[in-house]
Amino acid sequence: HHIRMISEGSCDTEDWSYDLGNPQLRIFRPTFNLTLVRPGKEQPPDTVQFRIPLEMTKFDVRNYLEKIYSVPVAAVRTRIQYCTNKKRNHLNQRVKRPDYKVAYVQLAQQQTFQFPDIFPEKDQKHEEGSVEEMQEKFMEDERQRQKSDPRRGGVTEWFGL
Amino acid sequence: MAVSRLTAAVCRQFQRVVTVSSHTQPQCATQAFSRFHLCQRRQTYDSWWFRSSMNNRALHTSCVRKGLEEFFDLPENWGEQTVKSGAPWTAKQLRVKSNEDLHKLWYVLLKEKNMLLTVEQEAKRQRLPMPSPERLKKVERSMKRLDTIVTEREDALRLLQTGQERGRPGEWRRNVFGKTFWYRFKEHPIPWYLNSRYKRRRFFEPSHVAPYTRLSLEKYLRSKMRKDKRQKRNQKRLAAMFPKKTALA
């Protein structure tokens, strides 16, 4: 029973059940999508957090990562996150936020993973004559105008003439 | 390690490089396949493809994360507002490819989709706009088209070899509400007459439901007629507003 491969077909309406003695279930084009997410709570250095489809199991996650991404997996734990059905739209109908499954994957061979910063601050060089460049220059001028006279040496404008 | 080269070289318009995923086991799925394909510049970009096995993405300092790096974009694209990408695969282009190529392309598209979903989620988390969200739609469309091509080929093969129209057997049945629907067979370890749960699911309409099937049929026909009449009326109105004589003049 441990060897059950990804048991969901490429057309998800198939029910792929296994009975003892049947050949190993395989699918050739998985439709599962894994999303790597930044953990909300602090996780151990070897733990990676994924959002996976509800139909996926721990064995499926292990096989998926090992076969497709060649990531050595030591352990997988999953939980289902229930999302609210309480919010209402402008017609006062309840709107369900879809549920999702979270998988905590621990890497084998003492590997570590730290979620990187995907949106670092990059100082943008706008091209000459573009709208953004003019806007930036305008904002710069505004800021310059708001600053007080540097010749006063930091003294407030309340005093003086 | 033997780098497996695929015969169908595809060009790409943007800077993304698809690297071989692991050094330990040769995985041919990710080698040099682009999800995006540009018809015109095929010849000029072939040479570029051949020098594309750059593995030096040595940004991360922790040990071996080659596999998980594929969940993220190229490091030079981090923080950009837009990322260039080409056109999605069309069905016409995909039909030319062999089954092996399609299989490998499926996995390339799958990994790309995972990467885009990761970036999308992180952008939502950081409350920043995702760079080039149209890439997701492109990948989804490419995958859908690939799926249609593969099912086409499977259907054709099955029809030729066995004469069966569908892969999964089924039949038309009538449910308790009088509606006729296509019931798809499931595999069971026991016959149906020993299956108590299956016997509770009735596939016939009781006699007191029979009048309602006729009524619902009448309702459906009425709505269809009304729709046709409405369309004819609309066409007539438009023809009166824009007569043919003025179109030709």
Image (spheres, coloured by chain):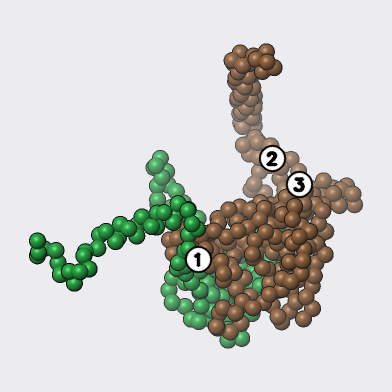
Chain colours: A green, B brown
Would residue B193 be found to the left or right of residue A92 on screen? right
Above/below status of A111 relative to A153 = below
User: Given the image, on which type of amino acid does mark 3 rest?
Assistant: Gly
Between disc 3 and disc 1, the foreground one is 1
Q: Let me know if residue A143 appears in the view.
A: yes
Earlier in the chain: of badge 3 and badge 1, it is 1
How packed is label 2: few (under 14 Cα within 10 Å), some, or many (20 or more)? few
How far separated are the C-alphas under marks 2 and 3?
10 Å
Q: Write down the residue under mark 2.
A: B181
Chain designation of label 3: B
Residue pictured at 18% horizontal, 72% vertical: A153
Quadrant in which the N terminus of chain A is drawn: bottom right
Q: Secondary structure at mark 1?
A: loop
Q: Secondary structure at mark 3?
A: strand
User: Given the image, on which type of amino acid does mark 2 rest?
Assistant: Phe
Q: Secondary structure at mark 2?
A: strand
Q: Position of residue B20 (x, y in %)?
A: 70, 73
How packed is label 3: few (under 14 Cα within 10 Å), some, or many (20 or more)? few
Chain designation of label 2: B
Q: Report the number of numbered marks.
A: 3
Q: Say the numbered circle drawn on residue B108.
A: none
Q: Are marks 2 and 3 on the same chain?
A: yes
Q: Say the numbered circle drawn on residue B79.
A: 1
Q: Position of residue B56 (x, y in %)?
A: 64, 78
Q: Write down the residue under mark 3.
A: B170
How packed is label 1: few (under 14 Cα within 10 Å), some, or many (20 or more)? some
Residue positioned most to the right: B161
* Residue contact between numbered discs 2 and 3, judged by CB atoms under 8 Å: no
Along the line of sight, which residue is nearer the eye, A45 or A57? A45
